[in-house]
Image (cartoon, rainbow, N blue to C red):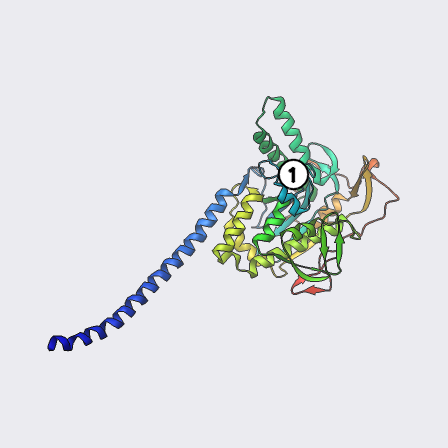
Amino acid sequence: MSAHRRKPTTRSRRRPSRRRRLGRTLLVTGCALTALTGGGAWYAYRDLAAGIGSSKALQGAEKSKFGDTNILLMGLDSRRDQNGEELPEEVLDALHAGSSDIGGYNANTLILLHVPGDGSRAKAFSVPRDDFVEIAGHGKDKIKKAYGLAKEKRQEQLAAQGVEDRRQLDREGREAGRRAQIETVRNFLGVPVDHFAELNLAGFHHLAEALGGVPVCLNRAVKDKHSGADFPAGPQTLDGRQSLAFVRQRHGLDMGDLDRTKRQQAFLAGATKKLNSAGTFTDPMKLIKLIDAAKKDVVTDEGWDLLAFVKQAKNLSGGRVHFTTLPVERFGRNHGEDINVVDDMKIKRLIAEQIGPEAAASPGAPGAASAPAASHEASREDAPPPPSSPPSPSAPKDGGGIPCVD
């Protein structure tokens, strides 16, 4: 009897015991998941550092002073991947970018991002791709051509030495292209370049997809068959295909290429805002998508601590970057091509005023004090003058914190 009386008591004690065990199990599981999430984020970063394209193009280059950082963002008009292979046809179709033989290796997007060491507002300077400047080892030409010209020259040298491996030719050619493009921008602006990031044409598509879309705002509706742009007026979120069309459009814009630089600035501002607001760097799945996109399309300088920059980049959203498009004096012609005639010294002074004369001290490279006037062959007196300083994307209209552009 006594034994039978004890059974209910035993059962009654087991119920809280099971609950306690369940609670402990959930607690341990939660701790494990937290640890795995943190560890996963760390592993993802290590994977990014190991898997992203790396370049030695900045080896031995002079660095900025006072903790400042200058980052050159280069967008290539290339329809090929990092190994020089053609992009798949379905990707080219999605990009509305034509054949992989089009575009070459012109640096159609050149933005110098200056991040002050004191934490004050960052500044970004867009360099119009057709600015007629002194190109390292070549003479005067459009600034966008520095990459492709040096790449082709190096590949020809290697081929003459008997190198036949296509990947080696492409790899060493692109390193030469990066060095020439960076040196050309450095000499033109009169500032050191501490880091760089190179993005191919498909990169805009993949970045927007990884972010789940990029917010932008347009002052008016546009439609362009050349780039595939077809957007209503007002704020909107662009997917990968739309993003590429947005940054590539120049037909139908009042100032053509100069207006396209505003589109590139607006895309960068929208992407930075999305990175911060979407919690990308605290969500392992979003981070992995971003890493996969970066590994496909991005090359940076060797030794750049990307994790440190990611933390810094969080402060660059929400209007914390001031964009400026460098001024063009007039339009001209050179060997049958349209060019932007620029005043080298005027631009160096502008940069010095914006970031401080000490930070803008020229590295002493050749061409840093070149004459501002373009060659006689390049001038075209009847060309319509562009605005002395094309406006940046700071139009009065606003789309939810995103400046509207034309």
Q: Left or right of 354: which side holds 310? A: left
| Residue pictured at 46% horizontal, 49% vertical | 44
| Residue pictured at 59% horizontal, 21% vertical | 162
Under tag 1, what secondary structure? helix
Residue 338: image x %, image y %? Answer: 80, 41
Q: Is residue 5 visible?
A: yes
| Residue pictured at 53% horizontal, 53% vertical | 310
Of the pair 379 and 199, the residue shown nearer to us: 199
Residue 52: image x %, image y %? Answer: 52, 43
As displayed, is residue 6 above or below residue 110?
Answer: below
How many labels sit on residues? 1
Q: Is residue 193 visible?
A: no
| Residue pictured at 64% horizontal, 53% vertical | 268
For badge 1, the amino acid type reads Glu
What residue is pinned by disc 1?
A: 183
Of the pair 201 and 365, the residue shown nearer to us: 201
Q: Image quadrant for the N terminus?
A: bottom left
Of the pair 97 and 170, the residue shown nearer to us: 97
As displayed, is residue 395 above or below residue 181?
Answer: below
Residue 60: image x %, image y %? Answer: 56, 37
Question: Which corner quadrant of the image does residue 236 belong to?
Answer: bottom right
Which residue sits furthest right? 382
Which residue sits furthest left? 1
Label 1 crowd (10 A; few <14 / some 14-19 / many >=20):
many
Q: Image quadrant for the C terminus?
A: bottom right
